[in-house]
Amino acid sequence: MEGNPQAKKEQLLIYVNQATTMYKSKGKGKYKSKLSPSIYKQYSKSGSWVKVKNSKTQKYVWIKNVKSLSKLPTKTNATMEKEIVTLVNKERKKRGISSLKVDTSLKEYTHFRSNDMAMVNYFGHSSPKYGRWANFLYTGEYKFSFAGENLAAGYMTAKDFVQGWMDSPSHKANMLNPRFKKISVTVVKGTKNSDYPTYATQWFAK
């Protein structure tokens, strides 16, 4: 990171809802291209100006008129999440596939995905507001060569979540894919307006 900004602080996520003109500095040195709508990490803030990284050029730029996404519920079902990872790795071990390692860098995205579904009350790989799940990876600066997402809702135990994914060919394929080396899981409770009592997101990456 340039100058190691906010090295000891949690970086906020911000939402760019439309193509936004980029500047080399606050209001100066306008770039010809625009930053694509999506989720970005906030590296610095000055008034209405926010410093982010352009994922295409890997350069730091200043934009304005963005919305913070940091105010999400922080509590998740950590015990169930760990149990899900254990159960997934047991299924992989049965088949001679190497275990997946939990990647904390993926956690902020699975955390956001599960909470987004619960709070907005939808269930699917595309958010009504933020678009396809892969948008988070492409603009979130996570380095990967291959990735996948599993979702589930309504289950009350880790065993039931994993069994539900194992009963689905496409979800099972993600969990048992030998190309994947990393995993992150987030399980949250639904809100009073949610259709389901629980929402879970699994992300896999290489």
Image (cartoon, helix red, strand yellow):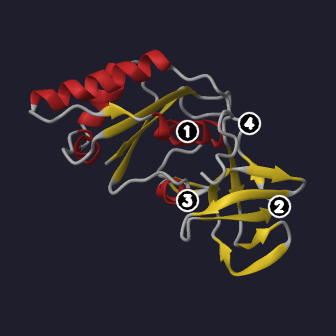
Q: Residues within 10 Å of mark 1 (few under 14, many from 20)?
A: few
Q: Earlier in the sequence, mark 1 or mark 4?
A: 4
Q: Which residue is mark 3?
A: 139
- Kindly indicate the quadrant of the structure image that contains residue 183: top left
Q: Earlier in the sequence, mark 2 or mark 4?
A: 2
Q: Which residue is mark 2?
A: 65
Q: Earlier in the sequence, mark 3 or mark 1?
A: 1
Spatial CA distance of label 3 from label 2 is 18 Å
Closer to us: mark 3 or mark 4? 3
Question: Residue 20 location, x and y as percent?
Answer: 73, 71
Question: Residue 94 location, x and y as percent?
Answer: 11, 27
Q: Which residue is mark 4?
A: 71
Spatial CA distance of label 3 from label 4 is 20 Å
Q: How many labels were placed on the picture?
A: 4
Q: Are marks 2 and 4 in contact (CB under 8 Å)?
A: no
Q: Residue furthest top?
A: 79
Q: Residues within 10 Å of mark 3 (few under 14, many from 20)?
A: some
Q: Earlier in the sequence, mark 1 or mark 2?
A: 2
Spatial CA distance of label 1 from label 2 is 23 Å
Q: Is residue 52 above or below residue 187?
A: below
Spatial CA distance of label 2 from label 4 is 17 Å
Question: Residue 149 location, x and y as percent?
Answer: 39, 46
Helix, strand or loop under label 3: helix
Spatial CA distance of label 1 from label 4 is 12 Å
At x 18%, y 32%, the residue is: 92
Residue type for callout 4: Lys
